[in-house]
Image (tube, coloured by chain):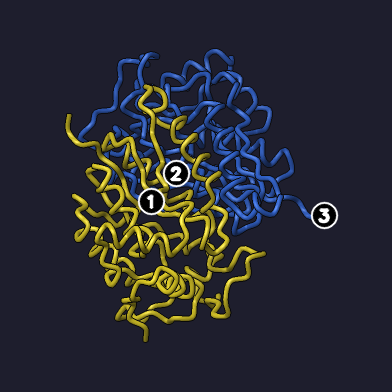
Chain colours: A blue, B yellow
Amino acid sequence: MSEPRAIVLVSGGLDSATTLAVARQRGFVCHALSFDYGQRHRVELEAADRVSRALGAVEHRTFPIDLSSFGGSALTDTRVAVPETGVDPTTIPVTYVPARNTVFLALALAWAEVLEAQDLFIGVNAVDYSGYPDCRPEFIAAFQRLANLATRAGVEGHALTVHAPLISLTKAEIIRLGRELDVDFAMTISCYQPDPTGAACGVCDSCRLRREGFREAGVTDPTRYR
Amino acid sequence: MSEPRAIVLVSGGLDSATTLAVARQRGFVCHALSFDYGQRHRVELEAADRVSRALGAVEHRTFPIDLSSFGGSALTDTRVAVPETGVDPTTIPVTYVPARNTVFLALALAWAEVLEAQDLFIGVNAVDYSGYPDCRPEFIAAFQRLANLATRAGVEGHALTVHAPLISLTKAEIIRLGRELDVDFAMTISCYQPDPTGAACGVCDSCRLRREGFREAGVTDPTRYR
């Protein structure tokens, strides 16, 4: 039997790069999927392409979807400022993009159905995260349930699985796992507002979590800060 | 208190027009949403715009999303022929677009979140339908559950509801309901392969179901056949 196919969501960040490495290690032929969704930080799409090739995806597609036309997030609406003063764990931050992971997984599901892939991988994380509702284990479980009702797979009995291998890891644990799997973190971009060369701001929520993760993991941080 | 807002998926067909009329009758301020998803039958987008205005939606948006880039359906892939020999109830037909309703509802959810709407309406139907897995009541229930886990609404406790008011009606019952609500069916297009003027083929699955529905309802069929 040939190797099974998987769709892997790749954003260009550290988490999704590690997720792709996990999917490859588990023996999947990986089709990497990114979204050009009107995000401010477009250099992450270039990072997604580098990461996909370096980690052995058989193909990488960038799907255009203009979520910025709905507005409502600092990541897609240039009138909303990216916060630089740290994470408030009691609220959903303005960097949350409405229903983003639901939309991304729905499109991954469409592609999976065409490719007859039964596995989706997403690098969400419920520990060192920014308080987004669509990064929680119950969200992933509900999407998997939906996927099996929504598609030929569900009707014809080939179960679809949504893998979120990082969901219960700390950022430091993700970094250690990625290093074991030879992920080159220098290729990845996590910053919410990198400059056009890809250099990170060092002060947004995502930079803070990443920097702290490297420190805690005892791994040298290869991030290029501006 | 002001009237609550709803997002209503409007395709230009008979079912979604009736669904919009139901949402208006229930007192919702309706934001109509259509998708330009690479479908063959683009005149349906013009029908969606006419229907939305005629039935009192406060706005109508057509969101571009190129599902044809994934391929896999007669409705988006011009290399696959539209069947003209009737519905085979034992299989999923080639006109099924992979994960279409999952993608459409996910995008409706994103817009609902930005508008702070707590209600989504979709005109799916599980009786006189073409055997699509994403038209079943269990699919709608699973999406509603997902929506409440995926969003601010779920976290902050404002429950989202996915309404599928036609789901258990026959085509004839939908036609009678639409007539009671003054839907002008002549505005709607159901055909999978209309000509550029909007005239229907009369032989695809969708035309057969529609024609049979008018006959059974005892309502004169205003469809313009070519």
**SS for callout 3:** loop
- Please tell me if label 2 and label 1 are on a single chain: yes
Count of labels in the image? 3
* Residue placed under numbered mark 3 in the picture: A1
Disc on res. A103: 2
Disc on res. A65: 1
B64 and B56: which is toward the camera: B56
Q: Residue B110: where, in percent of width, then height?
A: 36, 41
Is B59 placed left or right of B91 in the picture?
left
**SS for callout 2:** helix
Distance from the alpha carbon under mark 2 to that under mark 1? 9 Å
Q: What type is the residue that disc 2 sits on?
A: Val
The quadrant the C terminus of chain B occupies is bottom left
Distance from the alpha carbon under mark 2 to that under mark 3? 32 Å
**SS for callout 1:** loop
Distance from the alpha carbon under mark 3 to that under mark 1? 35 Å
Q: Nearer the viewer, mark 2 or mark 1?
A: 2
The answer to whether the residues at label 2 and label 1 have Cβ atoms under 8 Å apart is yes
A9 and A211: which is toward the camera: A9
Q: What type is the residue that disc 3 sits on?
A: Met
Disc on the earlier residue, 3 or 1 = 3
Q: Residues within 10 Å of mark 2 (few under 14, many from 20)?
A: many
Q: Chain of mark 3?
A: A
